[in-house]
């Protein structure tokens, strides 16, 4: 139980750090460079992705292995890309339809996605390389 609480706290800190990076770059792109908020959200996501992956893999989930890091990165990127699509849709809805400020909209969208992402990361990507191992077994069977 204590381990799960610590892991959850680390997830929140790691995610919060990546979110701060995301929000900072979002604000820079929109307010300083005057880039459209949706394009800015995508660019900020891409920058925050590496921060998120490194912190989640090595600190939150204590996955120190590097032999499957390329596969984990790919799977993590796929999940993150789906999240990016959902995030962009939520941003559009919150800003254009509900008239919520883009910055608050990003915070709301990120919070909603963080909950589902924790489950996916802990169960399928960083838990004993479960998904990576499944892919390896499928490739061995097809050889």
Image (cartoon, rainbow, N blue to C red):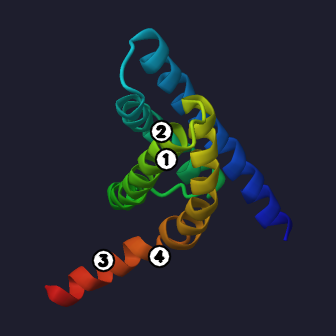
Mark 3: secondary structure: helix
Q: CA distance from mark 4 to mark 1?
A: 35 Å
- Secondary-structure class at tag 1: helix
Where does the image place residue 97, in percent across and percent down from the top left?
A: 50, 44
Q: Which mark is residue 136?
A: 3
If the image is split into quadrants, where does the N terminus sit? bottom right
Q: Give the Cα separation between the discs numbered 4 and 3.
A: 10 Å
Which residue occupies the extreme left position in the image? 143
Callout 2 secondary element: helix
The residue indicated by pointer 2 is 96
Q: Residues within 10 Å of mark 4 (few under 14, many from 20)?
A: some
Q: Nearer the viewer, residue 129 or 19?
A: 19
How dense is the environment of label 2, judged by Cα within 10 Å: few (below 14), some, or many (20 and up)? few
**Quadrant of the frame with the C terminus:** bottom left
* Residue 8 location, quadrant: bottom right
- C-alpha distance separating marks 3 and 2: 44 Å
Q: Quadrant of residue 116?
A: bottom right
Image depth: mark 3 or mark 1 in front: 1
């Amino acid at each position: 139980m204590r381990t799960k609480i610590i892991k959850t706290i680390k997830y929140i800190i790691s995610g919060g750090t990546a979110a701060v990076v995301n929000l900072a770059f979002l604000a820079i792109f929109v307010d300083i460079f005057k880039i459209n908020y949706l394009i800015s959200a995508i660019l900020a996501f891409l920058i925050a992705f590496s921060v998120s992956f490194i912190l989640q893999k090595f600190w939150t989930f204590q996955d120190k292995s590097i032999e499957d890091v390329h596969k984990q990165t790919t799977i993590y990127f796929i999940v993150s890309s789906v999240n990016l699509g959902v995030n962009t849709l939520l941003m559009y809805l919150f800003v254009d339809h509900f008239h919520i400020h883009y910055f608050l909209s990003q915070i709301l969208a990120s919070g909603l996605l963080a909950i589902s992402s924790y489950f996916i990361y802990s169960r399928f990507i960083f838990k004993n390389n479960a998904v990576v191992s499944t892919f390896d077994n499928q490739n061995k069977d097809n050889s």
